[in-house]
Image (cartoon, rainbow, N blue to C red):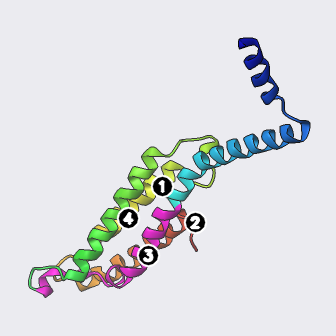
Amino acid sequence: MLEFALENSLYCLRISSDNMYMLIGASISGIALMIFGVLAKHVIAYKRIRFEIIQDLNFTSECYSNPIDIEKCGGKLPESYTKAQEFLKQDASKLAAFADTVPKAGIRRIGVPNPVKLRETAEELMKLSDSLTVESGEKETAEPVRELNSIRVRGIRKNLGVK
């Protein structure tokens, strides 16, 4: 009886050549999809972070284009400037954290800029968030800060691969 069951189960495992090719093709496709998923993880995360940064740069452009004197506002920063600082600091933090987790080299880094460049971009975002104000009573400092902010934003966009 045992011999019959064993022969019967082995007979069930016999696969025709057409079915064998289909099984091999399905296996290769499944493995390729798993590899793609692993490789695409960093690219997808980078594109999400890059989108958020560009969105916040566009949203806060009024603030970094017009640095404000806190003293003229009664010693308190307006809410729009406070929110702009928060957005830019959060973006810098996200980008710095991502730069620390992305591989330094290899196939898993395809589609993601160099981590050193990402770290520099995060530092520029932090500097931008700190340069929304000017020293009190110095009207001539607003223009250089505005121009420096413009240069920073162009550098950030360039490092992120956005024109």
Pointers 1 and 3 in contact (C-beta within 8 Å): no
**Which residues are drawn in magenta?**
47-73
Sequence order check: which comes first, mark 4 or mark 3?
Answer: 3
Q: CA distance from mark 1 to mark 3?
A: 17 Å
Q: CA distance from mark 4 to mark 1?
A: 11 Å
In front: 4, or 56? 4
Residue designated by label 3 = 55
Instruction: Answer left or right for 144 relative to 85.
Output: right
* Residue 109 seen in the current view: no
**Mark 2 neighbour class, 10 Å CA radius: few under 14, some 14 to 19, many 20 or more:** few
Pointers 3 and 2 in contact (C-beta within 8 Å): no
Report the residue at 9% width, 85% height from top.
74
Sequence order check: which comes first, mark 2 or mark 1?
Answer: 1
Identity of the amino acid at label 3?
Gln
Q: CA distance from mark 3 to mark 2?
A: 14 Å
Q: Is residue 102 above or below residue 56?
A: above
**Front label number (4 vs 3):** 3
Quarter containing the C terminus: bottom right
Q: CA distance from mark 2 to mark 1?
A: 11 Å
Report the residue at 50% width, 46% height from top.
102
Pointers 2 and 1 in contact (C-beta within 8 Å): no
What number is the disc on residue 125?
4
Instruction: Answer left or right for 106 relative to 29.
Output: left
Report the residue at 51% width, 69% height from top.
157
The x, y position of residue 141, in whole percent, is 28, 79
Q: CA distance from mark 2 to mark 4?
A: 15 Å
The x, y position of residue 79, in whole percent, is 20, 81
